[in-house]
Image (tube, rainbow, N blue to C red):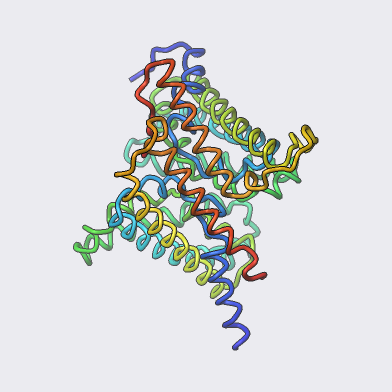
Amino acid sequence: MGNELTRLFELFIAASLINNFVFTMFLGLCIFFGVTKKMETAVGMSITFTAVMVISAALSWVVFFYVMVPLEITFLKIIIFIGIVAAFVQAADTMMRKISPELFYKLGVYLALIATNCIIIAVPLINAGEGYSFVESLVFALGSGAGFALAMVIMASIREKLDIARVPKPFKGLPIAFVTAALVALAFTGFSGLITL
Amino acid sequence: MQDTRGNWEIIKDGIFSDNTIFRLAISLCPAIAVTSKLKNGLYMGLAVLFVQTMVNFSVSLMRNYIHPRIRIPIFMLIISGWVTVTDLMMAAFARDVYRDMGLYIQLIVAFASILAHAETFASKNKPAPSVSDGIGMGIGFMIALVIISFFRELLGKGTLWGFTVVEFKPLLIMILPTGGFIAVGLLMGLFNWIDMRFYGGKGAGGLG
């Protein structure tokens, strides 16, 4: 049991820091550069993303191992995962609107954006590709979400400062954000080799 | 809302003025992820070119039969169908490339630009212009990927397509993830500068 826990912890660290979705795997960059102008939106986005990632990872795991593997239709995984995620996001949207309008007012905007985001669809695909167990998939999704949130918060806090900095005109906006991200990514390179799975 | 430009015009606009990566700054994930080698960059570009063209063609053929209210799910289905085709084809015919970037091929399904072109162009136009639009966008995307990966492989390893070109102590940083961000940032800045200096543009900030 202790061994199992250690492995899960390692998986969490690996997913959040070493293989950080944004800085080492380059997923979700559109969102990353799009919404990190303000801290508040960045935080809201990260919470929504993590929640959707964990739940959709669970759903897709069940469908993958209990429906697709027995029927030998694993080659359809792209279509099916997209369907699952989109349906879940739609359902969450509707339910949140009814059950907790307050929460919907805060996070609903982001929900609409994420149905077809690469970071969300990548989690089930990686889980299926690596053959993770159910708990491992959940931990992996949670770790990825935490890593994404960390990246968003770091970037948002830098960009709030960057707004008042004097930047050469051709570099204003996105190009300078990219170079900034490069420097943060360099820091994240330091995590590589921390744990070897 | 039919587009009145000629086919060549559409292709040209897709490559230059509406270049997905440098001008619109969307679908950037693979632009950085797979461009540490020229070969990977080119294959990724080809995959996107194929998917975009076929999606535009299929959507355009079916545009009169798709109910507007459920159009997005239908587009997603069409896109993921063609991505599956590409994914399986790459797995069969380009094994070494696929091992490096299989995940990113599958993730073409979540490309904002493919859905955007299906929605804004192919669903309103005849098949021929739609195919041109797909080809233009695909080639523009491919050129951007090739440019980025050209610089990254040359500077990071001193090789091109796996062959040694120059002998020097390579800048390892360029093939690390960091190098991808730097390369895209600098190239974007360069294109903005060219645009401002020679064409009097205001500089496309993209999302930023």
Residue at 70% across / 36% down in the picture?
B39
- Relative to B147, B72 lies left or right: left
| Quadrant into which the C terminus of chain A falls | bottom right
| Quadrant into which the N terminus of chain A falls | bottom right
Above/below status of B198 relative to B178: above
Q: Pick out the residue farthest to the bottom.
A: A1
- Relative to A44, B48 lies left or right: right
Residue at 51% across / 27% down in the picture?
B137
Q: Nearer the viewer, residue B149 or A96?
A: B149
Q: Nearer the viewer, residue A29 or B193?
A: B193
Q: Nearer the viewer, residue B85 or A190?
A: A190
Percent from the top left, x then y, of residue B6?
46, 11
Percent from the top left, x then y, of residue B40?
67, 39
Percent from the top left, x then y, of residue A70?
63, 65
Above/below status of A102 relative to B129: below
Q: Pick out the residue farthest to the left.
A: A102
Residue B69 falls in which quadrant of the image?
top left
Residue at 50% across / 17% down in the picture?
B12
Residue at 54% across / 70% down in the picture?
A13
